[in-house]
Image (tube, rainbow, N blue to C red):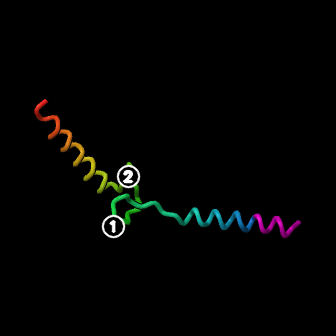
Amino acid sequence: MKKKIATVLFIGMAAIQLTACIAFTCKEQGCDETDIYEDGYCKYHYGINAGEEALKDIINNWGN
């Protein structure tokens, strides 16, 4: 019985350690920043993508 409990505890601890080692990084290819801001991007790449979207909206709605 003690072996079963020890085995379950060992497997549980191994699973916790594996999930703790997974670090989420920026969605931008080549960026290894782990401080995620919004939408899966780091603060720098979020600003770039938000600026591009705003510029596209302005251009597309210019004549309306």
Q: Where is residue 46 drawn, in percent x and y?
A: 31, 52
Q: What residue type is disc 1 on? A: Gly
Q: Which residues are magenta?
A: 1-8
Residue that appears at 58% across and 62% down: 19
Quadrant housing residue 57 = top left
Is 7 included in the stretch rendered in magenta?
yes
Tell whether 22 sits left or right of 28.
right
Q: Secondary structure at mark 1?
A: loop
**Residue at mark 1:** 30
Q: Quadrant of residue 2?
A: bottom right
Q: Nearer the viewer, residue 44 or 49?
A: 49
For marks 1 and 2, give the CA distance: 17 Å
10 Å crowding of disc 1: few (<14), some (14-19), many (20+): few
Q: Position of residue 42 (x, y in %)?
A: 35, 56
Q: Which mark is residue 37?
A: 2
CB contact under 8 Å: marks 1 and 2: no
> What amino acid is found at the position of numbered circle 2 in the picture?
Tyr
Q: Residues within 10 Å of mark 2 (few under 14, many from 20)?
A: some
Name the element at disc 2.
Answer: strand
